[in-house]
Image (tube, helix red, strand yellow):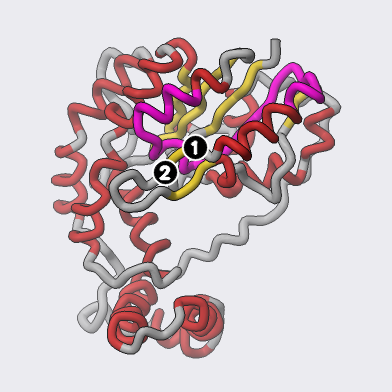
Amino acid sequence: MTTIYLHIGTHKTGTTTIQKFLSRNRQNLLSKRVLYPSSPVSHHDLLQNKGKDKPWGLNFDAWEYLLKEIKSEKPDKAVISSENFSRLYFDDVSKLRDYMSEFCPKIIVYLRRQDEYFSSLYCQAIKTAHHWDSVKKHILDNKAYADYYQILEPWKQAFGKENIIVRVYEKEQLSEGLLNNFLQSINLDTNKLEFKKGQSSNISPSIKKIKIIRLLNNITIGMMSIEKKKVTGLYYRFLISENPISRLIGKLPDFLISNELMSTQERINLLKEFEESNQKVAKEYLGRQDGKLFYTTPV
């Protein structure tokens, strides 16, 4: 029976890096009887946006096509990856279990310290011109996505705790790097197998640039209703890529524009809100009786 490793994210935990690696090495993986089903890079097409009240649901037509590919190839293992799986509600997770009933399912999830998760999520939303909210409002609107114990609950009920593989996206807990950690999670013997790792294409602008882009979003999109694609093109050309303007922004003194989104105390306070949830994840899924999910702190 084929084991399906369903990589559900979460967001901002190197998912794109993992997906590009798997896609780039599709043939290498097949030589080890590991299938990464056909897709440009990720498997986002297996899900569909259903609106504000229920953001994500399953795309059953895409699932039918993917399952046919797995049955045709008959691999020992198959890997499916999309960070949007982590945002499914219980009813869709339950349907997904039924969809994978002919296989042996394993769920892989990476978790990031909440203050770093929100910082990265916020910067991504700003630089792609999705909004111009303050970081405090952004955290308030998305707080449910960082309650990891609650996120894992429907997966535990549907697939069983023993089939959930929890990994922590933290340098101190990824001693051999993210990609090697992921390959270990799917029990892949990489001896005598040369992988193409490639370069990361996700540019992370400084916080000073993010703050300026946020102000520009307010003007260009909020007030002038300029198309997002045009706006982001200008950002990448003049603010995000290396050029005299972006270098000048980096030299602006901190008293004009600081290079931090949250103070240390704000980060500590945020982590306290998730302390109980994090402890439960550490104890229940990682067997850590001290309840320590993350090894680092904002201090």
Q: In x, y percent, where is residue 190? A: 75, 26
Q: Quadrant of residue 201?
A: bottom right
Give the spatial CA distance, label 2 vs label 1.
7 Å
Q: Amino acid at mark 2?
A: Trp
Q: Which residue is mark 2?
A: 56
Q: In x, y percent, where is residue 233? A: 54, 80
Is 258 left, or right, of 173 in this rendering? left
Q: Residue furthest front?
A: 61
User: Is residue 105 visible to us here?
Assistant: yes
Q: Residues within 10 Å of mark 1 (few under 14, many from 20)?
A: many
Name the one closer to the observer, 19 or 208: 19
Name the one closer to the observer, 185 or 268: 185
Q: Amino acid at mark 1?
A: Leu
Helix, strand, or loop for circle 1? strand
Q: Residue at x 29, y 47 (%)?
A: 53
Q: Residues within 10 Å of mark 2 (few under 14, many from 20)?
A: some
Name the one closer to the observer, 248 or 234: 234
Q: Quadrant of residue 19?
A: top right
Q: Which residue is mark 1?
A: 58
Q: In x, y percent, where is residue 137? A: 19, 60
Q: Residue at x 49, y 34 (%)?
A: 8
Is 293 left, or right, of 206 in this rendering? left
